[in-house]
Image (cartoon, rainbow, N blue to C red):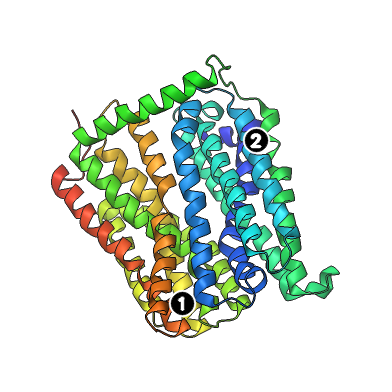
Amino acid sequence: MRNSVLLKRQTIYYALYDWGNSAFATTIMAGFFPVFFKQYWSIGTDATVSTARLGFANAAAGLIIALLAPLLGAISDRGIHKLRFLLFFTLLGAAFSAGLCFVPPGYWLSAALVYVVATIGFIGSNLFSDALLVDIAPPGQRELVSTFGYAAGYLGGGLLFALNVLMTLKPAFFGLTSAAQAVQISFLTVGVWWLIFGLPLQWCRPRVPPATEKASVLIGAAFCQLRTTLRHVRAYRPVAYFLLAYWMYIDGVHTIIKMAVDYGLSLGLGSNSLITALLITQFVGFPAALAFGWLAGKVGALKMIRVAILVYLGVTIYAAFLDSAFEFYLLAIIIGLVQGGIQALSRAFFANLIPVGKSAEFFGFYNMVGKFAAIIGPALVGLTGLFARHVGLIETNATRVGISSVALMFVAGWLLLGVATRESGQEHTYEE
């Protein structure tokens, strides 16, 4: 009976949305945009400077959507126009993803601005597609439907990315003149892919409550809700410390996702090798996440989160010394082993900390903190690299110093996680 929910039309449409919009995360965010930004839109620019520009662009996108998150969360909580807002952010993200195809070489600022808007569309659409889960699936079946969508996203995003990589390796086979043109067409395919598989969700018409509040009322309610949740979080010290820890280490995770390819390019590694490494991470990640969850069931979520933080810390430190594509491949495999697990288990551990009866309120704040992630890390990489260059380090070494600064995020996350654990006493549900 549980599997029958996966055969329902609205469940399939819901999974197809993940299948479609995940192409942005793989092909653009983690894959081709960092490469093209450095080699095409920032051509002739010092590698440290272009890395800083990319870091600031990622930080700006994260900051804007994080500031919008309270309002968007209030809208989602009330079930008001979820599909309309989902459609708006889908069209916004898909249009600006495709728009990257038309930014001419050397126009790095235009590319950064288009990318920021596309990223806002991507994150905003995720907010409302996540909120639709309660309307798509009944209690007891939401975990299954959510996992189904998560798996579809891995496959859909990975398949289009693999096709796009093939286009860049063999452009003549696809009737293209160069690898650069193949990348431009890839941006266009992301927008089209996103629309083709994302729009059917608009047709399934889940039972979403109609609009009953004016926009002015929603804005006031959003900030009232934020103030209330802040007071509640402060009253539960383990929750507060965990949210701080989560903010630190998940910011480091997102920074590595967004900056890894740019870092490899700054070291002089070939773009094809770096994109291949990203594909490795993508396809290792899905089965590894399942295995990570199984291990957490044996030894506990907290221990596995700590293992993942230590792995990321080791990866960040070693990355400062790597100098070959083989080493980059090795790190890609290691990251793939823990990337999905640390995100999934963080949510589970948080669920064990929050007070009974306040799950919706506290998870709303948890999701908002997650949206603020990838602000500090990218900016830290950019600023540290620029400072190292300013004090006289050669370009490559300055870039190495920049990426190694992300280790601070994992150290801070580890220490704050220890405080959260001591405050809670043990990994049990925190009850009033």
In the image, 360 versus 219, the foreground residue is 219
Tag 2: Cα neighbours inside 10 Å, few (<14), some, or many (≥20)? some
Residue 39 sits in quarter: bottom right
- Residue 278: mark in rendering: none
Q: Measured from the top left, where is residue 392 in percent x and y?
A: 39, 84
Disc 2 residue type (three-letter): Phe
Vertical placement of 163 versus 240: above or below? below
Q: How far apart are marks 1 and 2 (CA)?
A: 40 Å
The answer to whether 184 appears left or right of 231 in the picture is: right
Residue 184 sits in quarter: bottom right
In the image, 76 versus 299, the foreground residue is 76
Identified at 74% across, 44% down, the residue is 196
Q: Helix, strand or loop at disc 2?
A: helix
Identified at 70% across, 36% down, the residue is 200
Which residue is identified by label 1?
330
Which residue is farthest right? Answer: 175
Tag 1: Cα neighbours inside 10 Å, few (<14), some, or many (≥20)? some
Q: Helix, strand or loop at disc 1?
A: helix
Disc 1 residue type (three-letter): Leu
In the image, 417 versus 207, the foreground residue is 417
Identified at 39% across, 34% down, the residue is 364
Which residue is identified by label 2?
88
Q: Measured from the top left, where is residue 165 in percent x and y?
A: 68, 68
Q: Measured from the top left, where is residue 283 in percent x and y?
A: 55, 63
Vertical placement of 243 versus 106: above or below? above
Identified at 30% across, 42% down, the residue is 350
